[in-house]
Image (tube, coloured by chain):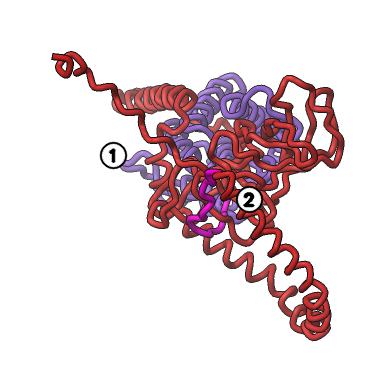
Amino acid sequence: MAPSRDRRPGFSRRAQYGLFLTYVGAISGALIGAGLLLLSTFNPSAYAAVRSFFAEITTPVSSALDWVKRGVAGAPGGVSEHWNVKAENDRLKKQLADNATLVERARTLNQENRRLRAMLQLRDGTADSVVAARLVNSSASSTRRYATLNAGSWQHVERGQPVREPDGLIGQVVEVGPNTSRVLLIIDSSSNVPVRRTRDGLPAIATGRGDGLLDIKSASLTSGDFKPGDVFVTSGTGGVYSPTIPVARVIRVQGDAAVAQPAANPDALDFALVQRPFLPEPAPTPTPTPTPKAESK
Amino acid sequence: MRSDHIPLRNTEERTRSSWAAPVSIILGSLVTLLPFIATFPFLPPFGLLMLLGWRLTRAEAVKVWMAVPLGLIDDMVSGQPLGSAMLLWTLCFLAIDILDTRLVWRDFWQDWLLASGAIGFCLIAGRLVAAPFSAHVDTALMMQIIVSALLFPVASRFCGWLDRDTIQR
């Protein structure tokens, strides 16, 4: 290709200064970028306001595309469902009759459990859900794992709230705009979730690896003795995630740690459920009143 | 009819590329709005690909300072820490400008090599600033770099097609 640009704009002073100024602009822009980058490395939520302003504009586009995708992907399923519905109806009726006794027994157990808990005076954390919304897009070209939720502070979503689906935990809200919020997925490499093993209650930490899997490390002094197939659920430690949300299943063991497959697949889910933090943040400790002398007088 | 006379105040004609370049680069950045929840980085950085496509095939369409605002917009939607594309894209532009003075005549293969180097630099540096060192993203990142480098000829042809009615000097 021919020389792309004549770098010398001739003898015109004006053109020379113009060219010089573009380089000044570029270099100072790069320096500003470096400054912003440093600030966002040390304080990741520094630009939450700017980013959520931008997300307010772009998320409707994603939501519309998401709606189209669901419509197109759902069409074949809808047609076949229409034809299979009678056979399925018969099958389900039979299953319902079979399950009636099981439900009855579960109800009794549930009642008993509630009574026992009341006797122990356990303080149950709240696990109310705030809103059900869709995850509409994600940071697919980045090494970070963020997703955008199309609900925000107008739907009472707040920073720090956990996000789950029926199958398992998805992540935590990190930035909130009026109508959108940003969710840090548990598979992000900076996410840590306190978990316990269902088999024996062994406490552990599930850390994202960045490639769609989780690293599980024992949180106690004993080594984990992990086995493929071990299931981990949230433990409720830390008070953010309410207990017994499925998190991951171990697929292979690596020394003291284990590699696990997350229980929830964020791309396949219909609705994500935003919940309140399990235990609300404690009220700020009252500042000691510095007036004991006045009282003693 | 085009005349050879160029008025004094207007040394460069406004061409289609003057608006098509920034618009197509921004649209490239906005590809992340597609409704997929990625579990690993699989999407090539289309904004960067278009930027390099314009810079290497139609250098007059993108000024050297334009990498700064375009990078800012990319940072808004990419999920990378803010400022990373602003810095890295501008560094790429400055590096390409310096190399332009060395390699006066570039052929397509040199363009491709330059673009692959720039893509690799941006993605690896972006990974180092965004994700902790222990993250297991390097395999996915290598695949992303290779796929992006293979897509560069497509991006560059696309830029040429967008700017098809401008006569090359």
Q: Is residue A182 above or below residue A79?
A: above
Residue interval drawn in magenta: A122-137
Residue closer to the observer: A77 or A294:
A294
Residue closer to the observer: A232 or A209:
A232
Left or right, B96 with respect to A100, comes to left
What SS does tag 1 mark?
A: loop
Mark 2 or 1: the one toward you: 2
The residue positioned 68% from the left and 34% from the top of the image is: A206
The three-letter code of the residue at mark 1 reads: Arg
Instruction: Tell me how many marks there are.
Output: 2
Image colour assigned to chain A: red
The residue positioned 80% from the left and 23% from the top of the image is: A256
Q: Note whether residue B49 is visible.
A: no
Location of residue A251 (image quadrant): top right
The residue positioned 62% from the left and 47% from the top of the image is: A170
Residue A232 coordinates in the image, percent (x, y): 74, 40
Residue closer to the observer: A94 or B17:
A94
- Disc number placed over residue B9 in the picture, else none: 1
* Crowding near the residue tagged with mark 1, few <14, some 14–19, many ≥20 C-alpha atoms within 10 Å: few
- Disc number placed over residue A116 in the picture, else none: 2
Residue A212 coordinates in the image, percent (x, y): 72, 41
The three-letter code of the residue at mark 2 reads: Leu
Location of residue B69 (image quadrant): top left
Q: Is residue B80 above or below residue A82?
A: above
Supply the letter of whichever chain is purple: B
